[in-house]
Image: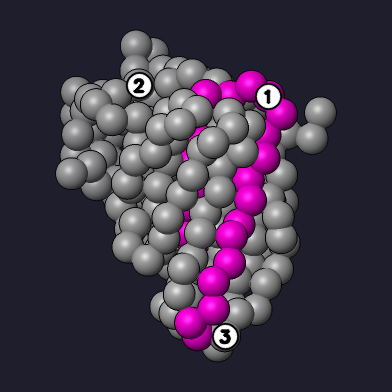
Amino acid sequence: NAGVTQTPKFRVLKTGQSMTLLCAQDMNHEYMYWYRQDPGMGLRLIHYSVGEGTTAKGEVPDGYNVSRLKKQNFLLGLESAAPSQTSVYFCASTFTSAGLPHFGNGTRLTVT
Amino acid sequence: KQEVTQIPAALSVPEGENLVLNCSFTDSAIYNLQWFRQDPGKGLTSLLLIQSSQREQTSGRLNASLDKSSGRSTLYIAASQPGDSATYLCAVHMNRDDKIIFGKGTRLHILP
């Protein structure tokens, strides 16, 4: 069991470039979440999904898009990266609303 | 809009002392509250999960309490050790929209 796997672990982008972060879970979890973490800011919710084919906005959704075409995968896209999107991105999943979230190890993204 | 506040932002205590970390939230419509630990440059480690119907949970030297009506939770750490040094985060799972919202964390330093 791999749990929650984030790909890639590190990435450097130039302003204006696009990329997709992949979160994959093998626990048959319904709920999946994308967060960004900046120094002193805790984790801020970007987008989330409560099931295959569904997505919803979190606290800081601007500049990001997501898709949940398969239950096990939750993709986070940056269409035109900006330096303000330099951050560490974490993905989480949970089986039910009462369940314990499982977190990936994070993706460190730098936009120059 | 749910706001989760953690006080203090940082705390230094001598080894061996008992200590309390605080978490407050503005909207009591939650499924549960969780406490996490994060070491520098690492991911999140789940410590305790308290369902909304529960008052407390214990794991080893850790005890977390929840007073949902007043919007407060505390994490009690007994007989602190240098290995307890980390950032501690609390998060609430909202039952209105399934968002999981984090506080900014308390950075704990245990002095040997």
Left-right relation of B63 to B94: right
- Secondary structure found at label 2: strand
Residue A27: numbered disc: 1
The residue at 44%/79% (across/down) is A82
From this view, report whether residue A46 is shown above or below residue A85. Answer: above
* Residues behind callouts 2 and 1 on a single chain: no
Kind of residue sitting beneath label 2: Tyr
Placement of A30 over or under A15, stated as above or below: above
Of residue B32 and residue B72, the one placed in the foreground of this image is B32
Point out which mark residue B30 bears. none
Of B73 and A3, which appears nearest the observer?
A3
| Secondary structure beneath label 3 | loop
How many labels, in total?
Answer: 3
**Three-letter code for the amino acid on which mark 1 is drawn:** Met
Residue B67 quadrant? top left
The chain to which mark 1 is attached is: A
- Look at the image and tell me whether residue B55 can be seen: no
Please state the extent of the stretch shown in magenta in the rendering: A15-39
Amino acid under disc 3: Lys
Q: CA distance from mark 2 to mark 3?
A: 41 Å
Q: Chain of mark 3?
A: A
SS label for mark 1? loop
Residue under label 3, please give it: A14
Which disc is residue B31 wearing?
A: 2
Q: Give the foreground label among 2 and 1.
A: 1
